[in-house]
Amino acid sequence: MHPLRSATGWGRIEGDSTSRSDWVTSYKVMVSNDSHTWVTVKNGSGDMIFEGNSEKEIPVLNELPVPMVARYIRINPRSWFDNGSICMRMEILGCPLPDPNNYYHRRNEMTTTDNLDFKHHNYKEMRQLMKVVNEMCPNITRIYNIGKSHQGLKLYAVEISDHPGEHEVGEPEFHYMAGAHGNEVLGRELMLLLLQFLCQEYLAGNPRIVHLVEETRIHILPSLNPDGYEKAYEGGSELGGWSLGRWTHDGIDINNNFPDLNTLLWEAEDRQNLPRKVPNHYIAIPEWFLSENATVAVETRAVIAWMEKIPFVLGGNLQGGELVVAYPYDMVRSLWKTQEHSPTPDDHVFRWLAYSYASTHRLMTDARRRVCHTEDFQKEDGTVNGASWHTVAGSLNDFSYLHTNCFELSIYVGCDKYPHESELPEEWENNRESLIVFMEQVHRGIKGMVRDAHGKGIPNAIISVEGVNHDIRTASDGDYWRLLNPGEYVVTAKAEGFTSSTKNCMVGYDMGATRCDFTLSKTNLARIREIMEKFGKQPVSLPARRLKLRGRKRRQRGGRANT
C-alpha cells in the first residue's frame, strides 16, 4: 500500500525495476480514501489490467482511464518475470488537492520566497540562463568553458567573484560541479538556482553573500555530461530510467574514470619506499592514462586540466538517487573486500565537511524520514565513507585528494534523480542552506604566504602538518590554504633550495582561516650556485673537486720523488 499525502486528481502510473532481474509484467490498481474500503480501477465493467515491464531498464507508462480522487493506493501484481520474483518501483503522477482537515500537512508544506526560475533547462536554456545572470551581475560573474563533450557541446562554468577572471593572492578557490551522470538532473538545476540566488542576494546587499563573494573565488559547473543530459531530457522526469543518459555518449562513467592513484600510494607505503618514489600528495598521473588510446572520456580530461590549472581548496560534486554526503577514500585498501572503511589522513576534516552539509540539509539527518532505497545513513548523521558504502577505483574524490590540493566530496542531493518540475522549489529549500554552508567551509584551517628573504612568493613549496601524512603545496604566487579542524598544529614549510621553517599555528572555532606565513632562506649551496651563475660559471660538485685535488697532490708527490 502506498499512502498519498494529498488527494489525487488524475494519475499516470510508471513502473521501473532496477535492482535485479525481477519485474512485474501486469498488475491491478486499487484506491481508497480511508485505507479500509478499497475500489479496484475498472475499464468498463471489468477490472483493468495494467501492462508492466518487459525488461528491467525501460519504464512503462500507463494512464488511469478516468480521473480519480484518492488518499491511498494499492498495487496488486498479477504476473511477473518467470525466472524472478515480484519487484516493482512505482511513481504516481497526479495533482494535489487541498485537504482542510490535514493540519499536519498544511503545517509542513514547503514553499519558497525566492524568485528563481524553477524549471528543467535543456542545454540551450541553460546557456541562456547563464547569460541572464551574467548580464544581471556583470561585475561579479564570468562565463567560460573548460572544454567540450564527446558531441561537441561546451562544458560551461560560471565564476562568481568580486574580481572575476583572476586569482587574487590569499583568496581560496571553491568549485561545485554537477551532472557527471547526465540523468541525475537535480544537481544541475540546483546549480542554476544557486547562480541566480547568489547574484540576486549580492545585488540586494545580503551581508553573508556579499562577504562570501568578496572573500572567495567560486566556480560552478552545472553540467559535466551535457550529452547524457540531453538523452535524459528527451524522456523527461516521467520516462527517465536508471541508465538513460547516465554515461557519456561513448559509454563512459565519468565519476569513476579518473586515474587510480590510491594503488600507487598504498603499494609504495607497503614497500616502505615513501617518500623517495611516491609522495603523499601531488601523485603524478601514470603515463598510460595520458595516452590517446586510454579509455578516458574527453569530459574527464577536461576536468583534470581544469583542476590542475586552478588551485582549488574545496569542491563538491552533486549527484542523485540518494540523500547522503560521501567522503574519501572511495576505494577499499584490502584487495579482497568490496566494502571497508578506508579513511584518508584527513579523515576528521572530511567528516566535518560532510557533516556541515548533511546537518544543514532539511532531510539528510532527519531520523523520521524514509530511506531512499535500502541503506540507512542515519548512524553517521547523513554521511558515509565512500569505500564503506561501495568501493570505486578511480573516483573523482580520491583523484582530487591525491593529485591536487583540493578536498572533494560527493553530495547526493535527493532520492529522485529526475524530480518533476513542480518539486524543484521544495528541493531548493531542502538544499539551499547546505549549499551556502559548505562553500563557507573553504575558510576553515590555516592560510598564508611562503616567501623568500626578498618577499617574493615561492611557488610549489610544501606545507606539512605534523601528525598528518598528507601535504599540500603553494600556488604560483606562493599563497596556500590548508583545511584543518580547530586545534593547535605544528606546521612546516619547505622548498627546494631553501631551509625549512616550522611554526605553531592555532585554528580557532570561529569562521575564518588562521594566518600562518613563512619566510624561507636559501641554503648555502643554493647561494653558491646563484653567485656562480651570476658570473657565468657553473658550481663544481664537491666530490669531483675532491678527486681533482687528490690527483694534483699525487702528481706533486710524484714530481718530488723523481728529483
Image (cartoon, rainbow, N blue to C red):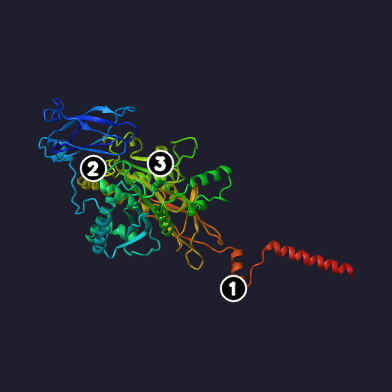
What is the spatial separation of the Cα atoms under label 3 and label 1, in whole angstroms? 53 Å
Along the polypeptide, which appears first: circle 3 or circle 1? 3
Q: Quadrant of the N terminus?
A: top left
Q: Quadrant of residue 96?
A: top left
Quarter residue 30 falls in? top left
Where, quadrant-wise, is the C terminus in this rendering?
A: bottom right
The disc at residue 386 is: 3
Task: Mark 3 and mark 2 in contact? Answer it, CB < 8 Å.
Answer: no
Q: Earlier in the sequence, mark 3 or mark 2?
A: 2
Task: Identify the residue under disc 2.
Answer: 238
Neighbour tally class for label 1: few under 14, some 14-19, many 20 plus, Cα within 10 Å:
few
Between 85 and 210, which is closer to the camera in this rendering?
A: 85
Select label 3 or label 1 by which is in front. 3
Residue 287: % across, % down: 52, 53
Look at mark 1 in the image and give the residue it sits on: 534
Q: Is residue 142 left or right of residue 392?
A: left
